[in-house]
Amino acid sequence: DIVMTQSPSSLAVSAGETVTINCKSSQSLLYSGNQKNYLAWYQQKPGQSPKLLIYWASTRQSGVPDRFIGSGSGTDFTLTISSVQAEDLAIYYCQQYYDTPYTFGAGTKLELK
Amino acid sequence: EVKLVESGGGLLKPGGSLKLSCVASGFTFSNYWMHWVRQAPGKGLEWIGEIEYDGTETNYAPSIKDRFTISRDNAKNTLYLQMSSVRSEDTATYFCTTHRTWGQGVMVTVSS
């Protein structure tokens, strides 16, 4: 199975700050046939279902604010949230969909400082 | 409106069986691979399986393989998760999802 390692596990921020969440996979998620990275990012707020933010490592889902930016390739990926807002406080998960089982990272909890 | 609605959750004893349903609306259900993801109380997300458009291919996580079965009825726009030989560690909220769209989840509790 592909192991997804997220860091940090939690992050305390003030509104307006820029934050970076890291996700590392145990093997490359870059498929040579289409040069796409099979990596997604989700946001989950308390009591809610997860919400897809980013797919193909850097493509923002429709309706997601452009302060959410996904980057990286191969085995190292980053979710950057610029100018964090109170509504962004949530747990963020990365997930690989390169190979089954489609494993998730353990999550990063974004809290208010 | 694109929507997924799960049902069928509840309390069951170890070794028991339960069948979850997920009804899709607002999109062409038969055009999508469908997935089940679960979340134990206070824990992270765990992908447990998927089913191809017409149900001919399924893939499962090792943790539930040979105990759970995913199926679908495209005529009814419905996805199913048949759970058998359940264990306490299967206690979780179960979500159906296309990845883009998620249901609200349904709680399954396994306890003697």
Image (cartoon, coloured by chain):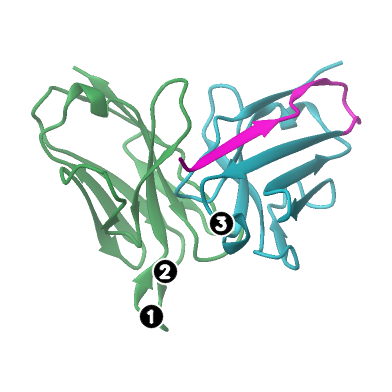
Chain colours: A green, B cyan
Percent across and percent down for residue A22 are 29, 47
Q: Amino acid at mark 1?
A: Asn
Camera-nearest label, 3 or 2 = 3
Helix, strand or loop for disc 1: loop
Q: Amino acid at mark 2?
A: Ser
Residue position for label 3: B28
Q: Is residue A18 left or right of residue B22?
A: left
Q: How many marks do you count on the picture?
A: 3
Which residue is pictured at 67% across the width and 49% down the height?
B77
Give me the C-alpha separation between circle 3 and circle 2: 32 Å
Helix, strand or loop for disc 3: loop
Residue position for label 1: A34
Camera-nearest label, 3 or 1 = 3
Task: Give the quadrant of residue A6.
Answer: top left
Helix, strand or loop for disc 2: loop
- The numbered mark 3 sits on a residue in which chain? B
Mark 3 crowd level (few <14, some 14–19, many ≥20, 10 Å Cα): few
User: Where, quadrant-wise, is the N terminus of chain B in this rendering?
Assistant: top left
Is residue B80 positioned above or below A97 on the image?
above
- The numbered mark 2 sits on a residue in which chain? A
Residue numbers of the magenta segment = B1-17
Which residue is pictured at 16% across the width and 27% down the height?
A85
User: Where, quadrant-wise, is the C terminus of chain B in this rendering?
Assistant: top right
Whether labels 3 and 1 belong to a single chain: the reply is no
Q: Amino acid at mark 3?
A: Thr
- The numbered mark 1 sits on a residue in which chain? A
Percent across and percent down for residue B33 are 60, 59
User: Does the magenta segment cover residue A100?
Assistant: no
Residue position for label 2: A28
Which residue is pictured at 51% across the width and 46% down the height?
B26
